[in-house]
Image (spheres, helix red, strand yellow):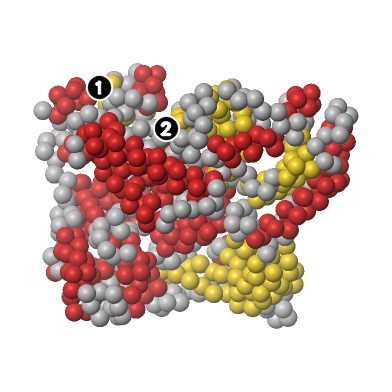
């Protein structure tokens, strides 16, 4: 496709995709299937990759996640993003109305759910999204534009090209997305987020927008901070107008004429909270008329024209009939309370997390106890307290041996977790295989969670080494697999054999060792044999490694099961050599930080070049940084380098050092 045809097609695709997004998110009226949307977005991405100059700020492809600077630049809010005064009883709501009535007679109120998420500002110029920032302390937040672009319900282009508008909204994680994230974190052995709000905040402040894009965040917009080109007089009018622009506004906002009706609506919202697809922690009352708000003004902390009613967490008593112990991918034993089912926050609850042995001991939880349970953040059932023990009950202790494989479990000093360290533990098998085949591991395309689960159920996989013994006939015994699909899986297995030591070490899932640690190990030792012979002290000498990481690596390779697995992988032809070849050591002891857009190479390619010459590529600037390499549109890293006096290289100067 030539440039002119590509330009026309890209413009057509952008318009289509932005229209489809608006129908799906703002109007709740989807007009195409998800697959069709994804195919059109892929076509647009291919055009923009061929002709980068065709990508525009409102392109739907930015939702996939591009790149962002390692630090978030500060954003000063010209209109303060105020917090609200809390009310915890209906009496306090009537007191609020009385105070309003002293200044404004016959005030009307808008009542809306209080979304439990992270407050952000979105700015648009001539109808195009240009900047997004967090609330911060109300006066100064952080620039998270790149991450906010990945939130599909945020319109990148408005239906009306207003000269300028700044809106305020609440970014949140839907309950379903939160449940999926918790499941994935459990599979990976990661520490789970406590509630959807923490998950939303953590996801929005990721340095890598691609991670944010995968977290399925959403937003409700609930306020206009600044606007040019349109005159509005009431809050209800402004919310209605925001809808026409393409924003997903806060749901079920209701205009009422008295505080009695406002309180009734607060009760109605509270009754529905357990059935909603998103988390709320209250309801908000706002004076509708903007002129009245101006007369009411604000205190040093809160506006006088609004109040937030906070719902108390619902708690109920039930009986703890059993404690189930599951084994995660990293071997952690996780206890779960099995309860007599009880209706809580709109759903039947029969299980609750018990976290770990310390939690159980602290609350003196025993089998047969009468306990109080609630949903943390209205999502995760948890035991709050014990009311009564059964007669002759005894304190509960986690098992001393793995409930899956029978191997002894251990608890390391300073840790709450009890874990099974047997890498061949059946309970960890599926989780270990998922990690082994993942992009961060051996990157075996086609080996998704469901495929691996079916292979395990068929008895075809008992360890990661069995992946290299698969054959077409065995794979084709599974429903849906034919000769070609089986051949594709086997090709992915074959290709992974040459992935190199760094990928293999990452795939093995060694505790405390991620992709970065695996690369450091591979670069330092060069091959598996050298690593197998290393002491914990020798491993700890690697820059970037500490004593805990080093001991974890040493302990892992000291296990007879690990030695057996490595031998099987070696016999199958898996490379045990590092692919990180150091050409020379001209950058030895140097630390580089890359910022901005490089013209002749990607940041990944530049990082690999630095490592090839013995240097280290870092994501943050400090006094120890040797050079900052600045491309076009360099951000806060460049500013920090200049402040600290760190030498800054242009791309051309960096390339000259590499010649």
User: Which of these two is toward me, 274 or 201?
Assistant: 274
The dot on residue 71 is: 2
Q: Earlier in the sequence, mark 2 or mark 1?
A: 2
With 56 as the anchor, is 379 left or right in this view?
right
Q: Quadrant of residue 82?
A: top right
Find residue 20 and report its horizontal and vertical position in percent: 44, 47
Is residue 70 in sight in this rendering? Answer: no
Q: Quadrant of residue 347?
A: bottom right
Rendered residue at 53%/59% (across/down): 176
Find residue 129 and report its horizontal and vertical position in percent: 47, 32
**The N terminus, quarter of image:** top left
Mark 1 sits on what residue?
Answer: 649
User: Which of these two is toward me, 381 or 427?
Assistant: 381
With 174 as the anchor, is 345 left or right in this view?
right
Please determine whether, in this image, residue 19 is positioned above or below residue 632.
Answer: below
Rate crowding at label 1 as few (under 14), some (14 to 19) or many (20 or more) other CA atoms within 10 Å.
some
User: Which of these two is toward me, 561 or 161?
Assistant: 161
User: Which of these two is toward me, 338 or 289?
Assistant: 289
Is residue 103 in sight in this rendering? Answer: yes
Rate crowding at label 2 as few (under 14), some (14 to 19) or many (20 or more) other CA atoms within 10 Å.
some
Please determine whether, in this image, residue 534 is positioned above or below residue 21.
Answer: below
Rendered residue at 51%/67% (across/down): 334
Find residue 601 and report its horizontal and vertical position in percent: 20, 34
């Amino acid at each position: 496709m030539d440039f002119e045809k590509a330009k026309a097609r890209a413009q057509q695709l952008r318009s289509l995709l932005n229209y489809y997004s608006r129908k799906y998110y703002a109007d709740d009226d989807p007009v195409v299937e998800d697959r069709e949307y994804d195919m059109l977005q892929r076509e647009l991405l291919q055009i923009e990759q061929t002709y980068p100059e065709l990508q525009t700020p409102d392109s739907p492809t930015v939702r996939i996640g591009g790149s962002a600077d390692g630090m978030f630049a500060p954003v000063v809010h010209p209109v303060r993003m105020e917090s609200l005064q809390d009310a915890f009883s209906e009496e306090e709501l009537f007191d609020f109305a009385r105070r309003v009535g002293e200044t404004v007679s016959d005030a009307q109120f808008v009542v809306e759910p209080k979304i439990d998420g992270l407050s952000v500002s979105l700015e648009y110029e001539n109808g195009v999204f240009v900047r997004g920032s967090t609330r911060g302390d109300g006066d100064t937040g952080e620039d998270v534009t790149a991450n906010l672009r990945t939130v599909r319900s945020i319109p990148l282009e408005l239906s009306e090209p207003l000269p300028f508008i700044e809106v305020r909204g609440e970014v949140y994680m839907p309950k379903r997305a939160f449940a999926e994230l918790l499941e994935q974190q459990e599979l990976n052995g990661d520490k789970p987020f406590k509630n959807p709000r923490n998950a939303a905040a953590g996801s929005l402040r990721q340095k890598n927008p691609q991670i944010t894009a995968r977290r399925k965040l959403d937003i409700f917009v609930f306020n206009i901070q600044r606007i040019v080109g349109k005159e509005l007089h009431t809050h209800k009018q402004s919310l209605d107008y925001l809808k026409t622009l393409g924003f997903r506004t806060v749901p079920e906002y209701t205009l009422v004429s008295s505080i009695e009706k406002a309180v009734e609506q607060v009760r109605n919202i509270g009754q529905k909270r357990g059935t909603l697809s998103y988390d709320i922690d209250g309801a908000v009352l706002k004076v509708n008329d903007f002129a009245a708000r101006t007369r009411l003004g604000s205190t040093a902390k809160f506006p006088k024209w609004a109040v937030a009613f906070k719902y108390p967490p619902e708690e109920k008593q039930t009986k703890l009939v059993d404690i189930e112990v599951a084994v995660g991918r990293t071997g952690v034993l996780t206890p779960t309370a099995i309860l007599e089912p009880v209706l809580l926050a709109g759903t039947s609850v029969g299980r609750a997390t018990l976290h770990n042995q310390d939690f159980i001991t602290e609350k003196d939880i025993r089998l047969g106890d009468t306990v109080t349970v609630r949903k943390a953040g209205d999502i995760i059932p948890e035991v709050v307290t014990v009311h009564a023990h059964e007669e002759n009950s005894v304190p509960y202790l986690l098992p001393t041996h793995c409930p899956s494989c029978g191997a002894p479990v251990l608890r390391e000093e300073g840790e709450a977790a009890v874990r099974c360290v047997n890498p061949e533990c059946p309970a960890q098998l599926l989780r270990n295989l998922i990690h082994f085949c993942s992009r961060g591991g051996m990157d075996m395309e086609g080996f998704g969670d469901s495929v691996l689960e079916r292979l395990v159920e068929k008895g075809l996989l008992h360890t990661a080494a069995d992946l290299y013994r698969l054959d077409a006939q065995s794979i084709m015994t599974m429903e849906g697999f034919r000769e070609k699909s089986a051949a594709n899986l086997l090709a992915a297995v074959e290709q992974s054999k040459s992935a190199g030591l760094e990928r293999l070490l990452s795939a093995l899932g060694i505790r405390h060792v991620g992709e970065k640690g695996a690369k450091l190990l591979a670069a330092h030792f060069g091959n598996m044999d050298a690593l197998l012979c290393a002491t914990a002290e020798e491993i700890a000498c690697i820059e970037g490694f500490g004593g805990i990481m080093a001991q974890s690596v040493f302990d892992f390779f000291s296990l007879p099961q690990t030695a057996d697995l490595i031998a099987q992988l070696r016999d199958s032809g898996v490379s045990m050599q590092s692919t990180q070849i150091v050409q020379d050591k001209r950058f030895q002891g140097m630390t580089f930080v890359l910022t901005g857009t490089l013209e002749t190479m990607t940041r990944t390619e530049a990082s690999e070049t630095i490592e090839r010459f013995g240097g280290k590529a870092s994501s943050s600037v400090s006094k120890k940084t040797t050079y900052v390499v600045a491309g076009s549109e360099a951000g806060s890293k460049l500013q920090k380098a200049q402040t600290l006096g760190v030498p800054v290289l242009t791309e051309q100067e960096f390339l000259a050092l590499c010649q």
